[in-house]
């Protein structure tokens, strides 16, 4: 296949103009569970990147709340150490830590030691916060979400007064099934208004995910084709090469369905399939996302494949199977892979299957959406050597490649009619210069300025769980599990799922 790279030319309107956002408001950013991995790897580096881009107010401070017996100075040092490792660049440029930026940020990091269940912790916090704006980030195990929000209510910290806002950012997992998600929403909403709750899905922090809406709705030529008249089917893949890593305890009771589908995969599907919102207002966007998720048919048992990785190799290195991983039950039935065929029951998508798959220990790390268009009529090529037409596919590359590829047919030069599949590619990093990013910068900044567009509303979360709930119900009974070798394309049953419809998955590995 030939590759044509879309390049800047004098005829193309070059839109790489600087987009300078305003500074966030003054206030306190409180991190519950601030001593943990998420804070070190993502939150502090993201706040540092925002500071470095001049987007934090001069009266911006951080308070870490945790149980460990450490001093604020120890904590600052440990943030600094991990910052040196984790402030990364998307490109090949090395990123150096700016000492002046770090000093300004770290001088304003404070520590409150205390248990999340104890009133004294919140009293100490309240004394430090006063009546400033405040964002509470719950970087804690899910079992503390309800407790912390209840305590914020009791202590008065959740109450907005005058111009000071109070917002709470909640990480996933948001519930472990539909019922628990509904219960958690109800509990949070007893203390907070919906507009104070920012439920995070880190996939929405990815530029390429945000670009799906820009691509669909800012270009006149995609939208008229984006429906059942022209699209044959859609494949959504979120493949990882990593195994369960150090998270066996969490993963054993979670599995691939809960871990990836109601949240990340459903967000990708919603962005791809939703109707155009009436504006980019947070509620307008979230209304449309929820609507499309609600239109998904109840998934049928025979349209779901659950898999688990067996021993195999990743990058030519042997790796053990899931059941041999430390901390995993040797008879575990937890799935590390799931593939599903989903049908959306609305005018735009009736009859167009959305095949989704996600798994660990697959052939490559790749998140991508492949929109397969219907073939052109073959009639014209009847009397030529062309025996079939290459399908048109639009690939939205989410990660690690970031961009868009269009696959179409072109005549192979020569005296007879032969067609070849060619690819036209837009590469994000080639076109735009991107600053260093953890993927959390936009989300944190948006919360500071009160823009909830990229966060999940209660009904959005519940609609995602509703899609997978039938699968969770079958899993109570001894459910089928198909094994696949680590480093492979996934279980054979997933290939059969598409073969049944005379289709096949795009390859994950190269
Ligand atoms: C997390 C899951 O939400 O997303 C992990 O809990 C998974 O199991 C991760 O590895 C994938 O995120 P990303 O950004 O690496 O695709």
Image: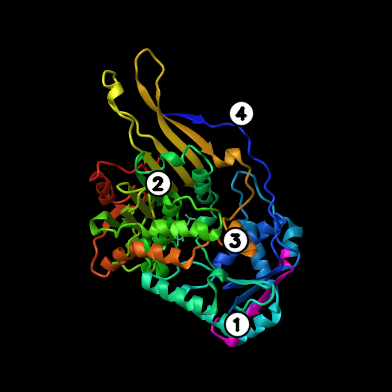
Across and down, in percent, residue 89 comes to 61, 49
Mark 3 residue's CB less than 8 Å from ligand 1: no
**Label 3: which secondary element:** loop
Across and down, in percent, residue 4 comes to 50, 29
Label 4 crowding class (10 Å Cα cut-off): few <14, some 14-19, many 20+?
few
* Structural distance between the alpha carbons of marks 2 and 1: 47 Å
Badges 2 and 4: C-beta atoms under 8 Å apart? no
**Label 2: which secondary element:** loop
Vertical arrangement, residue 414 with respect to residue 80, above or below: above
Q: Nearer the viewer, residue 102 or 466?
A: 466
* Structural distance between the alpha carbons of marks 2 and 3: 45 Å
Q: Which residue is mark 1?
A: 114
* Number of the front mark, 4 or 1: 4
* Number of the front mark, 1 or 3: 3
Name which of mark 2 and mark 1 comes first in the sequence: 1
Label 2 crowding class (10 Å Cα cut-off): few <14, some 14-19, many 20+?
few
**Label 1: which secondary element:** loop
Extreme top residue here? Answer: 415
Quadrant placement of the C terminus: top left
Side of 203 where 308 appears, left or right: left
Vertical arrangement, residue 346 with respect to residue 38, above or below: above
Q: Nearer the viewer, residue 170 or 360?
A: 170
Q: Which residue is mark 4?
A: 9
Q: Which residue is mark 2?
A: 316
Name which of mark 4 and mark 3 comes first in the sequence: 4
* Number of the front mark, 2 or 4: 4
Side of 357 where 289 appears, left or right: right
Q: Which residues are magenta?
A: 105-119
Instruction: Name the residue located 52 percent from the left edge and 37 percent from the top edge.
Output: 426
* Structural distance between the alpha carbons of marks 4 and 1: 59 Å
**Label 4: which secondary element:** loop
């Amino acid at each position: 296949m030939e590759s044509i790279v879309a390049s800047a030319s004098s005829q193309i309107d070059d839109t790489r103009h600087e987009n300078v956002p305003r500074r966030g408001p003054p206030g306190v950013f409180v991190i519950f569970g601030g001593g943990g991995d998420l804070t070190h790897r993502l939150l502090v580096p993201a706040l540092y990147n925002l500071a470095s881009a001049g987007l934090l107010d001069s009266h911006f401070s951080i308070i870490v709340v945790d149980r460990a017996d450490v001093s604020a100075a120890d904590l600052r040092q440990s943030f600094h150490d991990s910052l040196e490792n984790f402030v990364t660049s998307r490109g090949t440029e090395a990123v150096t830590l700016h000492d002046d930026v770090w000093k300004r940020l770290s001088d304003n990091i404070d520590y409150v030691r205390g248990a999340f269940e104890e009133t004294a912790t919140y009293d100490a916090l309240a004394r430090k916060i006063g009546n400033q704006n405040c964002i509470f980030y719950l970087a804690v195990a899910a079992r503390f979400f309800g407790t912390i929000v209840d305590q914020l209510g009791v202590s008065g910290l959740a109450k907005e007064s005058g111009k000071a806002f109070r917002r709470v950012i909640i990480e996933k997992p948001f519930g472990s099934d539909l019922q628990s998600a509904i219960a958690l929403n109800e509990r949070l909403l007893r203390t907070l208004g919906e507009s104070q709750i920012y439920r995070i899905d880190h996939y929405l922090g990815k530029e390429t995910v945000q670009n799906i809406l820009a691509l669909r709705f800012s270009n006149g030529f995609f939208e008229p084709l984006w429906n059942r008249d022209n699209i044959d089917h859609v494949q959504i893949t979120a493949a990882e090469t990593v195994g369960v890593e150090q998270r066996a305890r969490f993963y054993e009771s979670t599995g691939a369905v809960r871990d990836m589908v109601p949240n990340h995969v459903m967000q990708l599907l919603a962005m791809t399939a939703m109707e155009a919102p009436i504006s980019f207002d947070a509620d307008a966007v979230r209304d449309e996302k929820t609507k499309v998720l609600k239109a998904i048919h109840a998934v049928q048992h025979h349209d779901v494949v659950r898999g688990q990785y067996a021993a195999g190799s990743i990058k030519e290195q042997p790796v053990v199977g899931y059941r041999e991983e430390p901390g995993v039950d040797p008879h575990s039935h937890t799935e590390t892979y799931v593939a599903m065929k989903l049908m959306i029951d609305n005018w735009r998508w009736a009859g167009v299957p959305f095949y989704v798959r996600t798994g660990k220990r697959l052939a490559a790390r790749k998140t991508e959406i492949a929109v397969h268009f219907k073939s052109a009529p073959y009639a014209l090529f009847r009397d030529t050597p062309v025996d079939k037409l290459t399908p048109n596919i639009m690939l939205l590359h989410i990660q690690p490649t970031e961009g868009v590829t269009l696959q179409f047919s072109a005549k192979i030069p020569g005296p007879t009619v032969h067609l070849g599949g060619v690819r036209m590619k837009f590469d994000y990093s080639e076109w735009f210069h991107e600053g260093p990013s953890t993927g959390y910068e936009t989300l944190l900044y948006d919360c500071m300025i009160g823009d909830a567009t990229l966060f999940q509303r209660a009904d959005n979360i519940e609609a995602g769980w509703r899609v997978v709930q039938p699968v969770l119900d079958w899993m109570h009974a001894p459910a089928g599990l198909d094994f696949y070798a680590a480093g492979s394309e996934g279980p054979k049953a997933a290939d059969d799922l598409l073969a049944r419809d005379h289709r096949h998955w795009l390859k994950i590995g190269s």
